[in-house]
Amino acid sequence: MSEQGKPGSHARPSEHAAPSEHAAPSERHAPSELSGASTSVRGQIGADDPTDGATATAGPAHGAITGARPRENRLDATFRRLRDAGEMGLFPYLTAGFPDPAICATLLDAIAESGADGLELGIPFSDPLADGVTLQRASERALQHGVTLRTAFDLVRGLRRSHALPVVFMSYVNPLLAYGLDRLCVDAAEAGVDAFIVPDLPFEEAPQFQAACISAGLHFVYMVAPTSPAERMDVVGARAAGFVYCVTLVGTTGARSSLSADLPTFLRSVRSHVAAPLVAGFGIATPAHVSALAGLVDGAIVASALADLIERTEPERVEAAVRSYVREMKDATRLGTAAGAR
């Protein structure tokens, strides 16, 4: 994975970079592999940055964010509610515009109405380095429908007409750079987005983007992986707001039949360094997986398993199938938490 948590992308900034061949995600990528993205972030958030001075500014590369702290938003209220209720949160992931924009809008409403505590909405990209074949296909189908960041904003605006659950955008960095980071954060906040996850943004450049997020009232979500050293977790703990994404495995996204036996040790280690809520993702597919996370994390993300369900279900039945699956997974967060408390 990259220094942020997944592999870096060094394609030129564009909403749809040309595909290329890359190794599986690993933190062993050299920092030089990420220089293209990091230079672009520096270039976009500089002397004329609206976050300069009065609001948040980037601290040292290996320290906390200095200046103003992130304002609370829907994510903070959600984790507070979950903590008071003794529940773990469920955060389903959908690729924006998959399987097509109209059905995606319907499914977002269905997920919200079926008990999800928040949503992760992925921005389709032609070179999704951290994703397995299921989410690669989802991105490809969305791109075939012409889906861009603006489409994703429209989907969130539609959701906000009826639902207040938090929405987190997951995007590779190039589409964000093409849009313009300062304008991106302002437009995202206006649409009703609460946070960004940027898996291929170099860790050392994250404070610049985080400062722009803070200025707009958004959270920047850091990622840690089983290969993250203790020193990195300490820095993440100092910078974190909203939640920290705990990657449960070394590899790409994709549903797994079982979770790693080493996962509890990893999550307890993260907890010893990070006070912010922890949310686990990658490979979580069944209610049993969710229940196994009880007492270890504050939330779980289900992504590839949900995309698999959508892909294999006939269009006229997909909404009902998604509702049933989300309810079943949400029930596991309650039962699993209760079991973990005994």
Image (tube, rainbow, N blue to C red):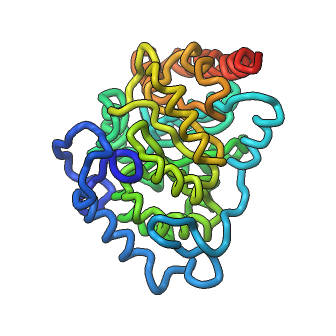
Quadrant occupied by the N terminus: top left
* Image coordinates for residue 302, horizontal then vertical, percent: 52, 28
Count of all numbered marks drawn on residues in the image: 0
* Image coordinates for residue 341, horizontal then vertical, percent: 75, 20
**Horizontal arrangement in the rendering, residue 80 relative to residue 235 (left or right):** right
Image vertical order of residue 230 relative to residue 208, above or below: above
Residue drawn at the location 60% of the way across and 40% of the way down: 271
Residue drawn at the location 37% of the way across and 58% of the way down: 202
Q: Nearer the viewer, residue 116 or 142?
A: 116
* Image coordinates for residue 195, horizontal then vertical, percent: 58, 53
Quadrant occupied by the C terminus: top right
Q: Nearer the viewer, residue 186 or 247?
A: 247
Q: Farthest residue in the right direction?
A: 84
* Image coordinates for residue 9, horizontal then vertical, percent: 28, 53
Instruction: Mark yes or no: residue 97 visible.
Output: no
Q: Farthest residue in the left direction?
A: 21
Image vertical order of residue 217 relative to residue 325, above or below: below
**Horizontal arrangement in the rendering, residue 273 relative to residue 138 (left or right):** right
**Horizontal arrangement in the rendering, residue 238 relative to residue 230 (left or right):** right
User: Image quarter for residue 57?
Assistant: bottom right
User: Image quarter for residue 165?
Assistant: top right
Image vertical order of residue 45 relative to residue 303, above or below: below
Residue drawn at the location 40% of the way across and 30% of the way down: 249
Q: Nearer the viewer, residue 44 or 154?
A: 44
User: Image quarter for residue 107?
Assistant: top right
Instruction: Mark yes or no: residue 82 visible.
Output: yes
Residue drawn at the location 67% of the way across and 67% of the way down: 69
